[in-house]
Image (cartoon, helix red, strand yellow):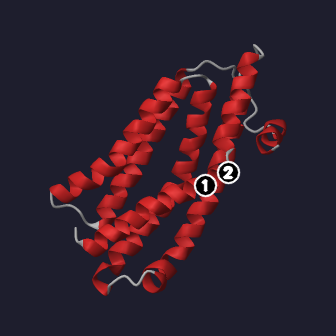
Amino acid sequence: MGEEAFGILTLLWAAIGYFSLFDFGLGRALTQIIAAERSAQATVQAALLRTGLLGALLPGVLGGALLWLLTPYLVYDALNISAPLQAQALGAFRIAAVSIPLVTLGSGMRGALEGFENFRHAALIRGLLGTLNFVGPWLLVAYGQGELVEVAWALLLARLLSLMQNAWYLYQNEWASSSSFFEKAVWQRLWG
């Protein structure tokens, strides 16, 4: 892969990790609200879950847009990337930008799973994601496909697989259906 490309890969890992801060603690808030509803013997409403996940997704979209907009500056000015790697780095950072909403949504989903006391599956998904974060790029490099863009796609795919697993386990939890997609009261509880 080369030293410079590996350095860019570590920056991609860091960017995806640091932009998880755009969750703003909503995953933890969702854990608390769902756990409180369940401990009060209340049925967790689907609108609560949907509103919470929307609350986790929106800041991720903003963070992803911010990284997307900053990418040309990072690649061409701030990081001093050599000319042969600039196109690859630009593509890789843009793919990482698309990953940011998946990161925050995944945090919300993990929070919901933990609120449903489904800790085993939450830990399993987190462990699998952590493994794929490093094994995916390693496999690509080992088999000669270690371009930065392909590695960034592997990181994005790992996030997508994690989200699909989270969605599957959340779907298996029982909560009452609700016709409302968004509830202002839930939104205020999440941010309160």
Give the residue furthest to the left: 143
Asked whether the beta carbons under mark 1 and mark 2 sit within 8 Å of each other, the answer is yes
Residue 28 position, x and y percent, is 66, 38
Instruction: Name the kind of residue labelled 2 in the image.
Output: Phe
Side of 37 where 115 appears, left or right: left
Whether residue 43 is visible: no
Up the image or down, 95 lies above or below 2; here it is above
Percent of width and height locating residue 113: 57, 29
Q: Residue at x 37, y 82 (%)?
A: 81
Q: Which residue is at a point 36% across and 70% down the rendered structure image?
A: 8
Position in image of residue 140 (x %, y %): 22, 56
Q: What residue is rendered at 51% in x and 81% in y?
A: 73
Return the residue at label 2. 24
Label 1 crowd (10 A; few <14 / some 14-19 / many >=20): some
Viewport quadrant of the N terminus = bottom left
**What is the spatial separation of the Cα atoms under label 1 and label 2, in whole angstroms?**
6 Å
Res 126 → quadrant? top left
Q: Residue furthest top?
A: 41
Which quadrant holds residue 150? bottom left
Residue holding disc 1: 21
Q: Check the image and report above or below for 152 versus 5.
A: above
State the SS at label 1.
helix
